[in-house]
Amino acid sequence: MHSPELLKGTLQTIVLKVLKDHGRMYGYEITQRVKELSDDRILLTEGALYPTLHKLEAEGMLRTETETIGKRVRKYYSLTPQGRSLVKERVSEFVAFIKTMGNVLQVELG
Amino acid sequence: MHSPELLKGTLQTIVLKVLKDHGRMYGYEITQRVKELSDDRILLTEGALYPTLHKLEAEGMLRTETETIGKRVRKYYSLTPQGRSLVKERVSEFVAFIKTMGNVLQVELG
DNA sequence: TCTTATGCATAATTCTCTTATGTATTAACA
DNA sequence: TGTTAATACATAAGAGAATTATGCATAAGA
């Protein structure tokens, strides 16, 4: 598991990008996908994930549909057009940040 | 200027690595060096830097020498042996984190 | 039957940083 | 020569983003 401090500020970026690549997903599914993609190194906590999803929805970046599987409710999230723009922005920001950090730390990344 | 959220958790790593590469430095000098290396994109604030330096010193990672230039006091910091180990650890952690993020975000970094 | 996994949600707390404030010296510019 | 910007330290108040704790409920597996 990575030092949790480094993760700060990357949660929105992760959620948005995973939603872009995979399409329609529900919260729990996102945590599992991230866990898988990160080889168990990034474990999203519910206390961070759900408020983030709600916030992005309130800002018009995500839209939701609720589905009932058996007796269990799932809330599916997908990107709105604005959300799609935001992903690009966030990912480029992150890439730019990493390049800068590479210079400051004098290390080769990637 | 980078999104300040992304910076969270990287301050210790930055300070330690810059001190390792440059040797003995004082606080203000560190901010200028980082500003330069990052092409003005990372501007360390005093409110974050000084407490971090004090903390690392208290933990035995840094040692200090005070010098008076004219009537102005400078506090020089340098790495202790433990500090030197910590740099390696922090930088590898960061590199590992970036690799993981590359997988999760499906982007080429570096 | 009991534990683990699935699935959502929110409140309390912690941690790290920004912003604001304070003090003081030195250089530059007008 | 007076004012501003740069140098140099430090700490306190506040904000923001996460962790941890808690709560509820269904489904699967041992």
Image: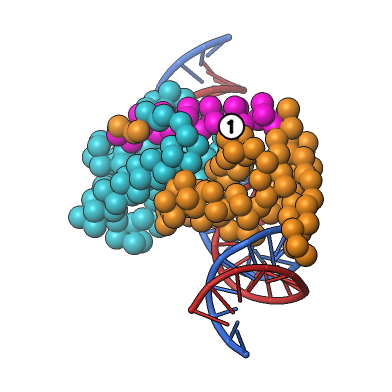
Chain colours: A orange, B cyan, C blue, D red
Which image quadrant: the C terminus of chain B?
top left
Nearest the eye: B18 or B10: B10
Badge 1 marks a residue whose secondary structure is helix
Mark 1 sits on what residue? A90
Which image quadrant: the N terminus of chain B?
top right
Membership of A39 in magenta stretch: no
Q: Where A94 falls versus B89 (above or below)? A: above
Nearest the eye: A55 or B82: A55
Image coordinates for residue B68, horizontal then vertical, percent: 31, 42
The residue at the point 30 percent across, 34 percent down is A107
The image quadrant of residue A17 is top right
The residue at the point 59 percent across, 38 percent down is A22
Secondary structure that dominates the magenta span: helix
The residue at the point 70 percent across, 53 percent down is A51
Image coordinates for residue A92, horizontal then vertical, percent: 53, 27
The image quadrant of residue A81 is top right
Q: Which residues are magenta?
A: A82-107
Q: Chain of mark 1?
A: A
Image coordinates for residue B105, horizontal then vertical, percent: 50, 37
Image coordinates for residue B4, horizontal then vertical, percent: 56, 38
Name the kind of residue labelled 1 in the image.
Arg
In this picture, residue B66 sits left or right of residue B105: left
Q: Furthest-left residue in view?
A: B81
Label 1: how many residues lie within 10 Å, few (<14), some (14-19) or many (20+)?
A: some
Membership of A95 in magenta stretch: yes
Q: Where A65 falls versus B105 (above or below)? A: below
Q: Is residue B34 visible?
A: no
